[in-house]
Image (cartoon, helix red, strand yellow):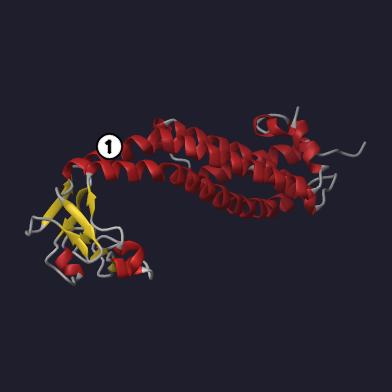
Amino acid sequence: MSFWQTPFFALFRLDLYRRAAGEKISKGFFYLVYLSVLMGVFSVMAYNIRAVPEVKDFVEWFKADMPASLVWTPQGLQMPLQAPYAMVHEKYGPLVLFDLQKDETTAAQMKDYPVLVTARKIYLRPVAGSGNIRSYDITAQGLTEDTNQLSSIGPVQITPALVQKTYDSMRPWILLIVFSAVLVIFFVWKVMAALFYSWFALLMNMRRHDKLDYSQLLNISILALTPAIAINLLRLFIPPLEFIPFGFAGSFIVTMGYLFWVLKKTDVRPA
């Protein structure tokens, strides 16, 4: 059995936990890094399976519903239609309001729209119903200090083809961000979880005849996280399983069960 097969055999091989107790703690943390990489890869796969179709549909809707003849110039946006133009999604409701006649706006004037676009600024309301809004200058002066660089570009026609090209160029970066974010967050989260469960392992260790030191218990705790992680992965890829309650309580019960099983079965009673 190789190190790379550890997540599978950690589900049922008691001898693997015995061996983990004899390893250096650095190997336990390396195992967490390995799990984090796997989780990053699986998250990218899940994103492609579950989120990408939704994102593609959203991009298609945006291309079909966006204002016609929308043009960016160094001075801001222009479009022939002077009246406000609203983009309302059939599933997500009001999303974007174009009102190029406005210079400034308030949260009340944005109504139910999380995004309002004026000729010179984009206003965002991060939380629905909140009075807090953020504004971003979209003129050449607001986008860069080197205004000559953008001024030399001239007017840019914002077309459905440009929207599609922008999305296609962003896709690899989105996947990289998903992978990197999951890797870092998962690793930190599981380090904290291993430390949390190691305290329960210490309590269980008090009832053992063959006492283990803390580093051994921490390695066992790290390995015992695997079954709950596997269950959560199954729930990620099999949507019907999401309706079965699990969460922290389920993870706690499964991990504590494995800790109890391992520490009891690996105890060596005196002759």
Q: Amino acid at mark 1?
A: Asp
Placement of 164 over or under 104, stated as above or below: above
Placement of 106 over or under 152, stated as above or below: below
Placement of 250 over or under 143, stated as above or below: above
Q: Quadrant of the C terminus?
A: top right
Q: Position of residue 65 (x, y in %)?
A: 17, 44
Q: Position of residue 177 (x, y in %)?
A: 48, 49
Q: Position of residue 258 (x, y in %)?
A: 66, 39
Q: Quadrant of the N terminus?
A: top right
Q: Would you name the residue on which mark 1 appears?
A: 57
- Asked whether 118 or 271 is in front, the reply is 118
Residue drawn at point x = 42 percent, y = 35 percent: 48
Q: Which residue occupies the extreme top position in the image?
A: 1
Q: Position of residue 9 (x, y in %)?
A: 69, 29
Q: Is residue 72 left or right of residue 224?
A: left
- Asked whether 156 or 19 is in front, the reply is 156
